[in-house]
Image: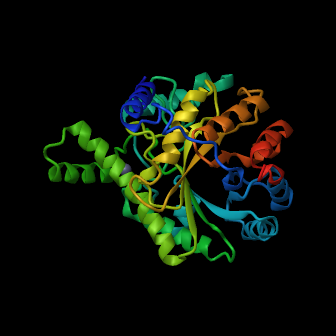
Amino acid sequence: MMSRFAGLILLLMLSINDGVTRGDSNAARPSNPAERVLTGWGGGKADEVVAPAAAVGFSELVVHHEDAASFTRFIELGKQHGIGIYAWMFLGDLPAWKKALPDDDPPWQVMNSEEQEALQRIKADKTPGKSSYQFGGEPVNELEVLETPLLCFHDQRVTEAFKKQFDEMLAFPGIRGIAFDYIGYQNYRCCFCPTSQKQLADYRKKHPKLSAQKALQRFSLETLVDFNNRLAAYIYSVKPDAKVIAHVYPVYLPELLYGNRLDLDVCAQTAAWFFEPFWSLEKIRTYSRIIAKKANRYHSRPRGAALVGYYNSPDKYSLKSKERLAAELQAILDGGCSRVHVCSFNAVLGNPEAAEAFRNFFGKRTRGE
Ligand SMILES: [Zn+2]
């Protein structure tokens, strides 16, 4: 139970070092409603979703940009409804790779044989609830990996491919910025492709005192963070007023809440995942405190955001009730985090109870109460 162990260590470290669990002086206060920001990840047709999203209280939406007419319409309607529109970047984006480097085979991340077997087992599992597979969130089972293949960002060409995509995104007039997604490892810890292994060998030569395990972890985390930061720096260099936001996903097991290492505008880290077992309110509060209070530990720029997963497919996965969503949102605010990201905003808009739960916290009428 790697993930539970890592989670336990995190909680332990927090209670020893942070102080937020001790005494009242550090207790986080619920945020001022006027400071709350709700960001939604999803898609759909702008004419069907932007106005309803505004009514729920969303002020930012992340959507695909490939269909230029559709994306332009999102920006246009977003402007009318006070919603900033971000283009969605995804590390498994094969079409983006092919567009940038049509003659090159995509450098996919590679997993070891045990992880490959886990992938086959997960893919073959068609049971409702998929045996508690967490789809890239903190695993519940012994060995989980992401079903989605991801490009290996240790290959310099991947950076170049996404820079080209960013040029295309940033050319849309009125775009608020770019949102990073799926920047992580398919096995939640490292990559075994030849390029990664070569770079790891060089890293070990430079850090001879580190154990093999420690070197792998540090190399994997440092390069993961560096990739995010290089991409963000590129975006700021092309369009200084563009915003860069990210969701830390899939989970990186050796350090769950590494998002504050990313030097970008807003980093969303998971505070309440999609699936059962739903996270305890104590865990949601604890994560939200870290997300909000430690946001500037490494950089002065970033603001922390808490991501809530909401999936509306009750035939397969337990639906979060209105009360459950309200309790999760309250726990996040109690943790001191005033920015919330939700995936997907379409699922929220598609369920009146969910929409109401979010509207109660973020709707314009509740502002200034
Ligand atoms: Zn690799």
The answer to whether residue 78 of the structure is visible from this angle is yes
Q: Kindly indicate the quadrant of the structure image that contains residue 174.
A: bottom right
Which residue shows up at 40% across the image and 25% down it? Answer: 5
From the top left corner, tell me how far across and down residue 209 is, in percent: 13, 43
Q: How is the image coloured?
A: rainbow
Which residue shows up at 26% across the image and 49% down it? Answer: 200
From the top left corner, tell me how far across and down residue 37 is, in percent: 67, 54
The answer to whether residue 103 of the structure is visible from this angle is no
Task: Tell me: 280 left or right of 77.
Answer: left
Closer-to-camera residue (86/152): 86
Closer-to-camera residue (64/193): 64
Q: Is residue 341 above or below residue 313?
A: below
Task: Tell me: 165 left or right of 219.
Answer: right
From the top left corner, tell me how far across and down residue 368 is, in percent: 77, 53
The number of numbered discs placed on residues in the rendered structure image is 0
Q: Is residue 82 above or below residue 24?
A: below
Task: Tell me: 44 left or right of 127.
Answer: right
Which residue shows up at 74% across the image and 48% down it? Answer: 345
Which residue shows up at 69% across the image and 59% down it? Answer: 60
